[in-house]
Image (spheres, rainbow, N blue to C red):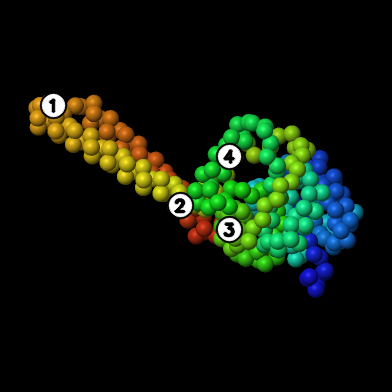
Amino acid sequence: MNPNNNILYSVVVPVYNGASSLEELFFRTQAVFKKNAHLFEIIFVDDFSLDNSWDVIKKLKDNFPEIVNGIKLSKNFGQHGATMCGFFHSKGDFIITIDDDLDFSPESIDFLLEDYNKTGSDLIYGVPRKTKKISFRSFLTKLYIGFSKIEGTKKGRGSSFRLMSKKLIERIKGNANNFVLIDEICLWYTNNISFIEVENPEGKRKKSRYSLNSLFNLAGNQIIFSSTFPLKLMTYFGTFVAIVNFLIGIKFIYRKMIFNVPLGYTSVIVSILFSTGIILICLGIIGKYLGRVLRATNNVPAFCVEQKI
């Protein structure tokens, strides 16, 4: 236990336009820790919300100054950046992350605590129970998880509802100056990970914080940031195309030698256009990787604090 403040648990909540659910989230979380007689703090990180989320956070801070901490970012850095900011300001021996929209019940924190007592894992994920609900988003999620597992069986299985040890937090804080994908960074430092199923109630947010475009961008960034799969795909596909073109070339040479057939203008044009398209796609993928390298070299910050209470 931390001898300076005796706080055992720090609850980090990245906030974006979550004013309608913040008070309920706080009181339900407070009830969980009161029941277990655990000292805790809750850190709300306002990721440049467009509603009155910051006013609600200030109100909670005024009423519960010993428990609530509020941080306002200078612009929107995204959920992972806001969460990382909360890590830097946490004081507890364990950190719990939960979304602001009650997509995960605060009461499910008990399951995280119970699992830690059984397993002692560095990282425990609360994952929603599988449902039969089918949607385009769920299809994309399953597709992304499938691709993630190419790089490792534990990739793509996480969620934003987690319990993390202070030891793990200290390790991943060193990567805050680069593009932040918390779940991937965690896999760099530990395999001591548990997954438990929890109820996934209907959240307060009527519309997801991520548009389909944002989801595609996040998935693309995560694949490029944490894996070499696109580069491997380029290598394999490029080799395949080269072999096919070589065989086609052999065919035309054979026809020319045996049947004295003039080489076809159309086949040449199609081969050139197809090869050029493949080259441009490969250059685009390489450009993405170079962009990430440039961001890392320039030490682009994961977050910037404008105000703290």
* Callout 1 touching callout 3 (CB < 8 Å): no
- Which of pointers 2 and 1 lies earlier in the amino acid sequence? 2
Provide the secondary structure element on which disc 4 rests. helix
Q: What residue type is labelled 2?
A: Thr
Is 98 in front, or is 131?
131
* Callout 3 touching callout 2 (CB < 8 Å): no
Q: How far is the residue under mark 4 from the one under mark 2?
A: 20 Å
Measuring 67% from the left and 67% from the top, which residue is drawn there?
A: 167
Q: Where is residue 141 in the image (x, y as percent from the top left)?
A: 59, 39
Asked if residue 81 is positioned above or below residue 215 in the image, the reply reads: below
Is 2 in front, or is 254?
254
Q: What residue type is labelled 4?
A: Lys
- On screen, residue 225 versus residue 195, left or right, reads left
From the image, tell me which residue sits under label 1: 262
In the rendered structure, find residue 228 and report the number of the disc placed on it.
2
Measuring 64% from the left and 58% from the top, which residue is drawn there?
A: 193
Measuring 70% from the left and 42% from the top, which residue is drawn there?
A: 129
Q: How far is the residue under mark 2 from the one under mark 1?
A: 43 Å
Q: What residue type is labelled 3?
A: Leu
* Callout 3 touching callout 4 (CB < 8 Å): no
Q: What residue type is labelled 1?
A: Pro
From the image, tell me which residue sits under label 4: 142
Q: Where is residue 206 in the image (x, y as percent from the top left)?
A: 74, 34
Give residue 261's quadrant in the image: top left
In the rendered structure, find residue 187 and report the number of the disc placed on it.
3
Q: Nearer the viewer, mark 1 or mark 3?
A: 3
What is the crowding at mark 2: few (fewer than 14 residues within 10 Å), some, or many (at least 20)? Answer: few
- Which of pointers 3 and 2 lies earlier in the amino acid sequence? 3
- On screen, residue 77 versus residue 217, left or right, reads right
Please say whether residue 48 is visible from this viewpoint: no
- Which of pointers 3 and 4 lies earlier in the amino acid sequence? 4
